[in-house]
Amino acid sequence: MHFRITGLPAEPFQHLFAMNEAELARHGAMRRIATDDGYPCRISLTDADIGDPVILVNYEHQDADTPYRSRHAVWVREGERRFDAVDTVPEQLRRRLLSIRAFDAMGMMLDAEVAEGAQLAQQIEGFFANRETAYIHLHYARPGCYAARVERA
């Protein structure tokens, strides 16, 4: 079964990079400099290099009008292109422990699992075996942050 993983679109975040710290704070965001590999960009699904400026901002990734509506902090980098690939798991996801959550078309959770990213493709295939699964959200299991979306391809 084919699947498509996508990062977040870059456009909604680009204006943040021109803001000063006070303006960012009014948007519930903050600028940081990456000091290790713990700054995963949700646009490109790559890790920031040490020394890269990044923005941490709250993002509503699950906008379904259900009890599962959700938002969380995400890191983004300036000038990144949105990851969008079929049957490809980016390295950023392959090397992390993930929470994998399957949702129906109404945004209700159908199933969930925690797995190493190296097993992600098999987990996706298993969730999409259920015809009711409309999409999957990936989260970094330890901090709980939203990582990416998966759809049928």
Image: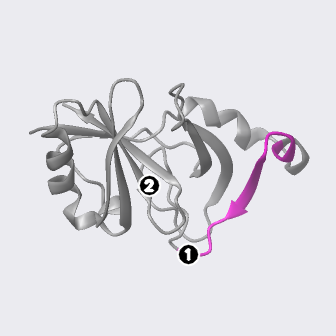
Q: Secondary structure at mark 1?
A: loop
Q: Secondary structure at mark 2?
A: strand
Q: Residue at x 71, y 43 (%)?
A: 17
Task: Reply above or below: 41 against 105.
Answer: below
Task: Reply above or below: 131 against 19.
Answer: above
Q: Quadrant of residue 34?
A: bottom right
Judging by the rendered image, the residue that carries numbered circle 2 is 139
Q: Please give left or right for residue 77 compared with residue 141 in the image.
A: right
Extreme residue toward the left, this view: 1
Q: Residue at x 53, y 69 (%)?
A: 38
Whether pointer 2 and pointer 1 mark residues with C-beta atoms closer than 8 Å, the reply is: no
Return the mark for residue 36: 1
* Residue type at numbered disc 1: Asp
Q: Please give left or right for residue 81 compared with residue 93 in the image.
A: right
Q: Which part of the image, by quadrant, shows the N terminus?
A: top left
Image x and y of residue 61, in percent: 52, 38
Q: Please give left or right for residue 97 compared with residue 10 in the image.
A: left
* Residue type at numbered disc 2: His
Magenta segment: 24-36
Image x and y of residue 67, in percent: 54, 35
- Residue 46 visible in the shown view: no
The magenta stretch spans residue 77? no
- Residue 18 visible in the shown view: yes
The number of numbered badges drawn on the structure is: 2
Q: Please give left or right for residue 131 compared with residue 20 in the image.
A: left
